[in-house]
Amino acid sequence: MGQVNVELTLKNAGDIAKAASFYIKEQEIRQIVVEAVVDTGAGTLIINEETRQKLGLSVKSKGYATLGDNSRVECQRAEPVEICWQNRSSICYPVVLQDSEEILLGVIPLEDMDLMVDPVRQTLTGAHGDEVAYMVR
């Protein structure tokens, strides 16, 4: 299977909450459109420091991550972001890898948005068709 790239909109989830409470205007929600690699070997959303800063996300904690080559690197966990892809969205705490060249969309937000990789078309598709099926058990 080849590499699957998708265009995502990432939004500062704290800003979304502030806008819902009328502390800021909708147009003040910090958001960016990014090209991401779908990585079913990654657990969550992986962003770089530049993306964290553009979204205005604070660092919540620091720790270590094990990469695909089994190397261990320092990382940070940032405030939550809303990931938007077509008609689906998910909120997660992204892992920040300082010098990452790519943004990676991992399995937890994929599952949350009821998405899977279509290896033939090399794209994302709904795991249960066009309607989102939420896991409740």
Image (tube, rainbow, N blue to C red):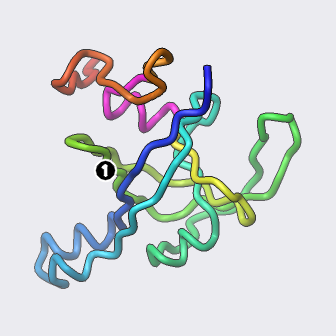
Q: Is residue 25 above or below residue 60?
A: below
* Numbered range of the magenta stretch: 106-116
Residue sitting at the far right: 71
Q: Is residue 38 left or right of residue 72?
A: left
Q: Residue 78's spot in the image, x, y percent?
A: 54, 63
Q: Magenta span has 109?
A: yes
Residue sitting at x 54%, y 69%: 51
- The quadrant in which residue 80 appears is bottom left
Q: Nearer the viewer, residue 93 or 48?
A: 48
Q: Is residue 118 above or below residue 15?
A: above
Residue sitting at x 43%, y 49%: 92
Q: Nearer the viewer, residue 76 or 38?
A: 38
Q: Residue 130's spot in the image, x, y percent?
A: 18, 24
Q: Amino acid at mark 1?
A: Cys
The number of numbered badges drawn on the structure is 1
Task: From the image, tell me which residue sits under label 1.
Answer: 84
Q: Is residue 28 above or below residue 57?
A: below
Q: Is residue 114 above or below residue 100?
A: above
Q: Quadrant of the N terminus?
A: top right
Residue sitting at x 11%, y 80%: 22
- Tell me the element at label 1: strand
Q: Nearer the viewer, residue 84 or 79?
A: 84
Q: Magenta span has 52?
A: no
